[in-house]
Image: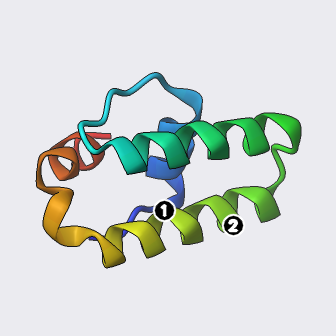
Amino acid sequence: MTVTILQAEKILKGNHAFKQFGFSMMVTRLKGLYAKDPSQATMQSCVAEMNAFLKKFNTIMGDDYATIKSL
């Protein structure tokens, strides 16, 4: 699964609960980065980091995929 820019924007601007703790921590950090600099370049960097995490840890992200897909 890959996160689109639109989904990433909803994740970063929303208040979604994710079951995977590592992903939740990463999203919290990315929210801070995006709040400081809401540019397109920052968003693309956030999308790339989210997708790298999802690719690496796809086996443990099962429950959270449903949350991401619903965005």
Residue that appears at 56% across and 67% down: 49
Residue that appears at 28% across and 45% down: 20
Q: Is mark 2 on a helix, strand or loop?
A: helix
Judging depth in this view, the residue of 20 and 17 nearest the camera is 20
The residue carrying mark 1 is: 50
| Image coordinates for residue 43, horizontal then vertical, percent | 69, 56
Position of the N terminus by quadrant: bottom left
Note whether 58 is above or below 19 in the view shown.
below
Name the kind of residue labelled 2 in the image: Ser
**In the visual, does 34 lie left or right of 25?**
right
The residue carrying mark 2 is: 45
Residue that appears at 45% across and 62% down: 4
**In the visual, does 70 lie left or right of 33?**
left
Q: What crowding class fits label 1: few (fewer than 14 Cα within 10 Å), some (14-19), or many (20 or more)?
A: many
Name the kind of residue labelled 1 in the image: Met
Query: Looking at the rendered structure, which numbered label has been put on residue 35?
Result: none
Judging depth in this view, the residue of 57 and 49 nearest the camera is 57
Q: Which residue lies furthest to the top in this view?
A: 15
User: For residue 47, which quarter of the picture?
Assistant: bottom right
| Image coordinates for residue 66, horizontal then vertical, percent | 15, 46
**In the visual, does 5 lie left or right of 44?**
left
Note whether 63 is above or below 15 in the view shown.
below
Q: Which residue lies furthest to the front in this view?
A: 21
Question: In terms of sequence position, does the residue under pointer 1 or pointer 2 come before the other?
Answer: 2
Asked whether the beta carbons under mark 1 and mark 2 sit within 8 Å of each other, the answer is no
Residue that appears at 50% across and 41% down: 25
Q: Is mark 1 on a helix, strand or loop?
A: helix
